[in-house]
Image (spheres, rainbow, N blue to C red):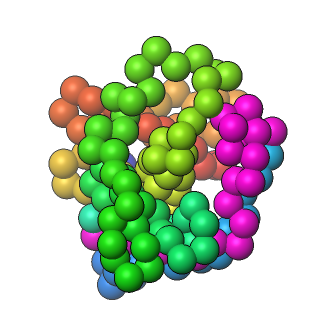
């Protein structure tokens, strides 16, 4: 673990506290022009998001309408009723974006994939970087920001930044 990653983790309460957390729950409203371009003009309005920090799972309720929920589970997505009856699924959502342009619309399952994947990563990134399978190294600073690059094997994962 690098000095910068230790600093980032400490700023988020410390790894020892994080390891006791099992879920992150929050309410969210997400709208905007980018979602309108993707033909998702309603976005998300006052949804409950439940992120499982021990595995790649995000639950969004209601989604896409009242009485249903969206589940991002280890890279796959499904929509089900609140009783658990599956109404749709997309097993390879990442591949469904092949050939897309910035203005290409998303269907509900693609929107769910974006939301589930992005929110899971955003909310857990400092702790994903502390995973034993992830290698981190500090990069050259950018202005006042210190930068951290991460990879799992040969696959880049992302960057984290911290003020000095």
- Residue 18 in percent (x, y) is at 38, 76
Q: Answer with left or right where residue 61 lies relative to residue 28.
A: left
- 77 or 75: which is nearer to us? 77
In the depicted structure, whether residue 117 falls above or below residue 36: below
- Residue 76 in percent (x, y) is at 31, 50
Q: Residue at x 73, y 32 (%)?
A: 37
Q: Residue at x 68, y 60 (%)?
A: 44
In the depicted structure, whether residue 59 falls above or below residue 92: below
Is residue 85 visible in this depiction of the protein? Answer: yes
Bounds of the magenta span? 33-54
In the depicted structure, whether residue 4 falls above or below residue 52: above
Magenta segment: does it hold 137? no
The picture quadrant where one finds residue 124 is bottom left
Q: Answer with left or right where residue 148 lies relative to residue 29.
A: left
The picture quadrant where one finds residue 152 is top left
- 137 or 75: which is nearer to us? 75
The picture quadrant where one finds residue 81 is bottom left
Q: Residue at x 44, y 27 (%)?
A: 97
In the depicted structure, whether residue 74 falls above or below residue 91: below
């Amino acid at each position: 673990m690098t000095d910068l990653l230790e600093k980032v983790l400490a700023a988020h309460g410390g790894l020892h506290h994080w390891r006791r957390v099992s879920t992150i729950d929050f309410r969210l409203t997400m709208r905007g022009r980018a979602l309108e371009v993707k033909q998702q003009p309603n976005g998300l309005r006052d949804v409950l998001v439940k992120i499982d920090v021990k595995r790649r799972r995000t639950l969004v309720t209601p989604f896409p309408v009242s009485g249903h929920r969206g589940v991002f589970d280890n890279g796959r997505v499904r929509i089900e009723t609140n009783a658990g009856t599956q109404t749709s699924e997309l097993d390879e959502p990442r591949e469904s974006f092949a050939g897309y342009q910035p203005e290409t619309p998303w269907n509900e399952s693609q929107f769910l994939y974006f939301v589930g994947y992005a929110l899971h990563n955003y909310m857990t990134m400092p702790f994903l970087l502390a995973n034993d399978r992830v290698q981190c190294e500090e990069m050259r600073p950018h202005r006042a920001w210190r930068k951290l690059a991460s990879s799992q094997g040969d696959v880049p994962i992302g960057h984290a930044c911290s003020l000095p």
